[in-house]
């Protein structure tokens, strides 16, 4: 059999709870001695993954191997892994010593004994009190809790309880230590200290750490490798540097650190257009391809207006200690940037980004999404500058409009909501847009800037004068640079309010 | 002037501590004074014209009567046996009831509590009839009949406090125990049981002392063959032997005190928060 060098290896692990897939096709090899972190927002399946390794949950599909041995369906007590729980789960009826000694007291080790006839045989025996004593005090001194053995756990502070929980796990010398958001209950300062201590402990013990957290900073500080998860699916696996500097998609970029994320379009070889300006970049994508652009705030340079690639106006300023954080309005877009120099709010500044610092990511297009849409006084949705008729009653199930063309929505409970000027996200399916050369037929007009033959249909990008792009699937042939109108049926525009509808309620 | 003002103000101002007045009055009227009366009767005798005098007569008559001591021992035994049987049956039942998969809509809990809604004397009479129909009556099996009646009556009082403790069991502690190498038996022994100890203590308190002083069950089901401490106290009072009766009530009081002390020892500190209580 092929010996796997990974200490833990998850292959095609899937977990379904009551019909909902929580973890989807999870593949990961953890090297011995590694500090690996699973990072993701709450509900992304990271804790479920940890619980499957610990044995509290069984995978619906797939295998979990430990040192090449299948442990997928072993009960927790038979697995050579130990867990540090989120809320510590210390035994309230035991003191510190007994909490730490619990695992050792449960353990049986093979001992060679000689029976009355003089035959030697292997017998499973509990550890002696002396051995337990020695191990417990060693574990307690690793977590800096010497002399605390007789304390009741309820009399300990949060940080101390945390240490007991760690000591209780490492005393068993597990092959892998699983940590389930262990620092989330501590205050900020304490958390920082514990991060450093955990990292040192990891070096000293040489045990593999499998860490789960939603705190990106924690993940970046401590890990050898980070696994970013979203909705049960691994997004990216890499070292902290890789994850930070080369996020694979907009989600990872947004989740790891602060970033500016924009929609962009490739306009030439290694040239990209976003926030109304053309930029040089280092990634090469096909012409006119829609892409996601990520720029880290610290990579945005603020220069004099005439030297900038584009120009914006500072709309806010926050002092952050070492640096200032500015929001610069460039047209309709906001650019978050950091600078150690002070600038006045309202000042005009030029913006420059080095081409290496523009991250370009391929965008999967399934729907046209317009995040800056709003509802005008005629009850229409305005995308760019073009108004579209839309079914506003879909915003609230069971509601109806006061009059046709009005912006007053009456809810099922009789409450009135005023939708005038409400900001919405509008979505239009690629298949639901009709192109026509009769310019009066559609609600918007634009130029076809790209056409691609995809198997059985064309995909066109129509750009309007106000630089909104409509991606359209169509069986008909058009040429680039054709001027066309864009028509969308009322019921094909999906709307989502940016603010809770209750905020729009009228007295 | 200032002083007069402050005086009137103090007279009218309502303080929170006044809220305890009704309770204090209740306590004095129905607890302190009766206990005092019991004490007085326990250590006095009365002459024929009704004058009280201090005496140890009731004390000596109790401790020199083998029958009464015997009844006390039997009562303690019945009480303990009842507590143990109730716990042995009630614990697994409460454990199952607290499992939300088994007890999805809490109807099962209701089923176990429902007997308490029926009048106690009626219920006991019915138990006697059912038992005798099954061939167990006070004549042939007085102890068996009494024990069945006792367990039947006190089981709900055991299940409820255990159930309230069980639904509050810290599941992550159970997981932690199993994570640290404890198999299901050891998880139960070293974690479930200690965690539910407060409920066990509560349940025992609810069963043990009331069993000693109950007399309807043993009277009805054993057809008068088993006399418990409650029976003999009742008997003494009904025969106007107030001094002897009071002294035995006093012994009962001391037993309650002892059992309270014992149970206090079991749930101290943090655990009392998780303690399941009936009321």
Image (tube, helix red, strand yellow):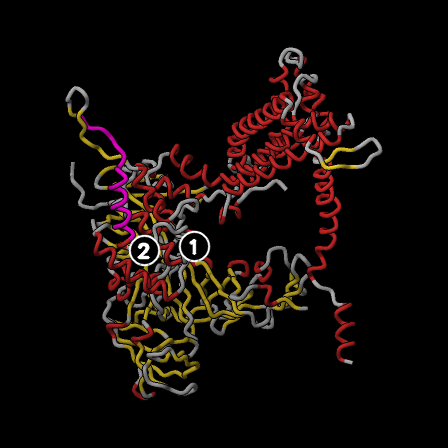
Is A104 positioned to the left or the right of A346 in the image? left
- For residue A475, the mark is none
Tell me: residue B149, above or below residue A190: above
B250 and A121: which one is in front? B250
Residue at 43%, 47% in the rendered image: A92
Is B122 positioned to the left or the right of A457 in the image? right
How far across and how far down the image is residue A479, in percent?
Answer: 35, 66
Question: Quick check: is A139 in the magenta stretch?
Answer: yes
Tell me: residue A60, above or below residue B119: below
Badge 2 or badge 1: first in the primary sequence: 2
- Quarter of the view holding residue B71: top right
B145 and B32: which one is in front? B32
A71 and A349: which one is in front? A71
How far across and how far down the image is residue A189, in percent?
Answer: 37, 66
Chain where mark 1 sits:
A
* Quarter of the image where the N terminus of chain A is located: top left
Q: Is residue A405 visible?
A: no
Q: Is residue A344 visible?
A: yes
- Quarter of the view holding residue A503: bottom right
C-alpha gap between disc 2 and disc 1 = 14 Å
- For residue A155, the mark is 1
Chain where mark 2 sits:
A
* Quarter of the image where the C terminus of chain A is located: bottom right
Tell me: residue A281, above or below residue B259: below
Look at mark 2 in the image and give the residue it sits on.
Answer: A145
| Magenta stretch, residue numbers | A121-140
């Amino acid at each position: 059999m092929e010996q796997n060098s990974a200490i833990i290896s998850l292959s095609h692990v899937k977990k379904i709870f009551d019909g909902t897939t929580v973890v989807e096709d999870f593949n990961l090899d953890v090297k011995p001695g590694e500090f690996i972190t699973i990072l993701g927002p709450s509900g992304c399946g990271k804790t479920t993954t940890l619980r499957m390794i610990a044995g509290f949950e069984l995978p619906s599909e797939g295998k979990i191997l430990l040192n090449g041995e299948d442990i997928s369906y072993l009960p927790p007590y038979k697995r050579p892994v130990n867990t540090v729980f989120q809320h510590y789960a210390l035994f309230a009826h035991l003191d510190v010593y007994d909490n730490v000694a619990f695992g050792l007291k449960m353990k049986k080790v093979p001992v060679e004994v000689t029976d009355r006839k003089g035959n030697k045989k292997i017998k499973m025996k509990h550890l002696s009190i002396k051995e337990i004593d020695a191990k417990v005090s060693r574990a307690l001194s690793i977590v800096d809790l010497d002399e605390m053995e007789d304390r009741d756990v309820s009399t300990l502070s949060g940080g101390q309880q945390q240490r007991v929980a760690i000591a209780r796990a490492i005393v068993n010398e597990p092959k892998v230590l699983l940590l389930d958001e262990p620092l989330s209950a501590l205050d900020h300062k304490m958390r920082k200290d514990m991060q450093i201590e955990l990292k040192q402990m990891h070096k000293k013990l040489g045990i593999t750490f499998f860490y789960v957290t939603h705190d990106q900073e924690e993940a970046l500080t401590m890990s050898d490798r980070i696994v970013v998860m979203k909705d049960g699916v691994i997004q990216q696996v890499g070292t902290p540097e890789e994850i930070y500097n080369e996020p694979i998609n907009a989600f990872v970029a947004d989740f790891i650190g602060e970033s500016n994320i924009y929609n962009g379009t490739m306009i030439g070889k290694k040239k990209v257009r976003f926030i109304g300006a053309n930029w040089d970049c280092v990634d090469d994508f096909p012409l006119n391809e829609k892409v996601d652009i990520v720029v880290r705030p610290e990579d945005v340079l603020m220069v004099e207006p005439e030297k900038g690639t584009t120009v914006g106006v500072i709309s806010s300023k926050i002092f952050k200690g070492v640096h200032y954080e500015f929001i610069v309005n460039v047209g309709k877009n906001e650019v978050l940037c950091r600078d150690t120099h002070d600038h006045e709010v309202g000042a005009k500044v030029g913006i420059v980004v080095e081409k290496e610092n523009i991250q370009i990511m391929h965008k999967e297009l399934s729907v046209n999404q317009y995040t800056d849409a709003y509802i005008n006084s005629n009850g229409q949705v305005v995308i760019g500058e073009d108004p579209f008729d839309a079914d506003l009653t879909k915003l609230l199930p069971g509601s109806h409009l006061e009059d046709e063309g009005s912006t007053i929505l009456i809810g099922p409970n009789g409450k009135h909501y005023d939708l005038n000027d409400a900001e919405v996200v509008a979505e239009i399916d690629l298949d639901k847009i009709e192109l026509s050369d009769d310019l009066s037929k559609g609600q918007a007009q634009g130029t076809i800037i790209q056409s691609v033959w995809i198997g059985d249909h064309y995909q066109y990008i129509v750009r309007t004068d106000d630089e909104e792009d409509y991606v359209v699937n169509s069986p008909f042939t058009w040429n680039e640079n054709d001027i066309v109108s864009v028509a969308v049926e009322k019921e094909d525009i999906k709307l989502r309010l940016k603010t809770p509808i209750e905020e729009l309620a009228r007295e | 002037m200032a002083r007069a003002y402050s005086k009137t103000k103090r007279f009218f101002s309502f303080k929170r501590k006044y809220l305890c007045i009704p309770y204090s009055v209740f306590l004095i009227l129905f607890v302190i004074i009766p206990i005092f009366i019991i004490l007085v009767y326990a250590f006095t005798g009365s002459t024929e014209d009704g004058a009280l005098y201090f005496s140890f007569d009731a004390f000596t008559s109790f401790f020199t009567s083998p029958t009464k001591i015997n009844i006390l021992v039997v009562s303690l035994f019945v009480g303990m046996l009842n507590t143990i049987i109730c716990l042995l049956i009630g614990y697994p039942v409460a454990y199952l009831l607290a499992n939300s998969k088994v007890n999805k809509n809490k109807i099962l809990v209701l089923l176990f509590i429902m007997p308490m809604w029926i009048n106690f004397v009626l219920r006991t009479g019915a138990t006697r009839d059912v038992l005798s129909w099954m061939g167990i009556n006070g004549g042939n099996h007085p102890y068996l009949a009494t024990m069945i009646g006792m367990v039947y009556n006190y089981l709900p009082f055991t299940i409820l406090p255990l159930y309230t403790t069980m639904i509050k069991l810290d599941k992550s502690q159970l997981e932690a125990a199993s994570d640290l190498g404890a198999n299901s038996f050891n998880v139960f022994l070293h974690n479930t049981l200690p965690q539910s100890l407060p409920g066990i203590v509560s349940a025992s308190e609810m069963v043990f002392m009331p069993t000693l002083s109950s007399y309807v069950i043993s009277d009805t089901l054993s057809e008068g063959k088993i006399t418990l401490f409650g029976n003999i106290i009742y008997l003494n009072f009904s025969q106007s032997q107030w001094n002897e009766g009071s002294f035995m009530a006093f012994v009962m009081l001391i037993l309650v005190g002892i059992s309270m002390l014992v149970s206090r020892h079991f749930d101290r500190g943090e655990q009392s928060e998780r303690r399941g209580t009936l009321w």
